[in-house]
Image: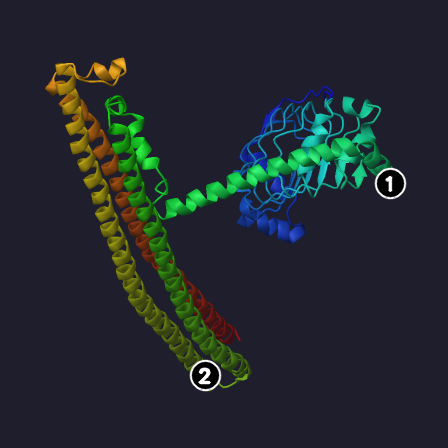
Amino acid sequence: MNRPYNSMEPRVMDEDMLKLAVGEQGPRDEARQLARQEGILFKDVLSLRLDFQNILRIDGLWQFENLRKLQLDNNIIEKIEGLEHLVHLVWLDLSFNNIEAIEGLDTLVNLEDLSLFNNRISKIDSLDGLVKLQVLSLGNNNISHMMNIIYLRQFKDLRTLSLSGNPIAEAEDYKMFICAYLPDLVYLDFRRIDDHMKELAEIKYQYAIDELKQREHLIQVRLEEEQARREELEEHKAAFVEHLNGSFLFDSMYAEDTEGNKLAHLPGVSELLQAYKDKFVIICLNIFEYGLKQQEKRKVELDTFKECVQEAIQENQEQGKHRIAKFEEKHLLNLNAIRDESELSSFEMKIAEYSQDVSELFNVLMTLEMQLVEQLEETINMFERNITDLVALFIENVQSLMAQCRDLENHHHEKLLEIAINTLEKILKGELDEDLPEDARALFVDKDTIVNAVGTSHDLHLLKIDNREDELVTRTNSWCSHLVDTIHKDEITRNRRRVKEINQYIDHMQNELDNLECSEIID
């Protein structure tokens, strides 16, 4: 499916090409002239045509962040790229290019209509992110395998499909196969699928479809289970207690403990180790359950704080709107009275009165904003104290529970050392009845060797416990600090935005007044 020979030089998208395209598709006549003078922001463009430009490579479109429709047909594009920022795109035409693979579309989650007609594509894939896809045009490509059709079953909204001009379309059961495996399809190759064809297809492929549905169901169940596990893990991470609802921490202590695994073969150590593990896991579960409860308390505290802030802002805004509404009601009457005034002295007096009203409104609005700032500052400070206390209490209690883990480890270390020394004495006296693996027996050279082996295992276990505790404390404190900092920054941003809004509104009112004075002077 090659493009016809084109004598034009290949072009790369640049600023000049984009500006020209936007300008040509923009407003007309006087509006176009004004737009050219003031400039058009690329982020405001909703539709863009770049067809027949001999474009070789897609580039520079990241600025069109609100683009809905993009036309790139009839170029010489070889690779789909540079579209990742166009997340609002609904319609995309890449037909009549030299594209060999479908790629680079993962972020286009709002795309409904995609045309890749007349390219060099041999496989339908990499469309998983296009969950809203309704129309797919892939005619005149190199698609030859029916399995490509089964891939399209995941697109529940797909209603229009074009595959004519591909090797696959030459297959004897082409249409019936598609009707069977894509039962919700309405149009195929620009023709409506009749109900009779659908019925025949369903009968012919019934057993194969039933088998496929069963496989799809099992896959879906597995995906949902994996998703549920991922979501559960994220909840546990948010509580800073992930992997503490079982033996993960305990198992990690022995995962790299070469000496400890050798010592596990000593007589009586297996029972000792199991008792140690059972008690250790119980403490981990206590930390886990306590962490989830504390996370819920922090969530309630944060939600309550947000509600308080929102209520305060809303109440303040209502007061501001009420004052503005009263002003504007009077404002219209004042403007009309000023315009109708013929006496200069009365005109100037009314202008002064109106100016005073504007100043009073400004003072009222700024006073309301300052009151809100003070109210929110008090609310934020109270929240900061509460959330800091909750975090401090959580850390304190977790550290206490972690200390219990260390106590268990110390107790286990003492018992293990006692067993190891007794075993050494039996070996030296030739009284050891149990057989030991060679790597375990190699430790029993002398007392120093066995003490060092037990000590090394002990140190590794303590390090694992310490590291998990440090990680929990560090992440919890970081979360708290980041949350409080963000809240303070958001309030500063809100205040600046509100003050700017007030100033802009007052400036607008004052400009109207100034215009009246100017017109009076001219008259």
Residue 419 visible from this viewpoint:
yes
What type is the residue that disc 1 sits on? Asp
Label located before the other in sequence (2 or 1): 1
Tag 1: Cα neighbours inside 10 Å, few (<14), some, or many (≥20)?
few
The percent coordinates of residue 516 (x first, y second) are 50, 74
Residue 344 as seen in the image, left or right of residue 256: right
Which numbered mark, 2 or 1, is in the foreground of this view? 1
Residue 107 visible? The answer is: no
In front here: 427 or 252? Answer: 427
Real-space CA distance between mark 2 and mark 1, rounded to the nearest whole angstrom: 77 Å
For label 1, the SS is loop
Q: Residue 455: x percent and y percent?
A: 16, 27
Position of residue 62 relative to residue 328, above or below, is: above
| Residue type at tag 2 | Lys
Using residue 51 as the reference point, say whether residue 234 is left or right of it.
left
Q: Nearer the viewer, residue 19 or 295?
A: 295
Q: What residue is pinned by disc 2? A: 350
Residue at 70% across, 33% down: 212
Residue holding disc 1: 194
Residue 215 versus residue 230: which sits nearer the camera?
Answer: 215
Give left or right: position of 521 versus 374: right
Q: Position of residue 465 (x, y in %)?
A: 25, 37
Kindly indicate the quadrant of the structure image that contains residue 503.
Answer: bottom left
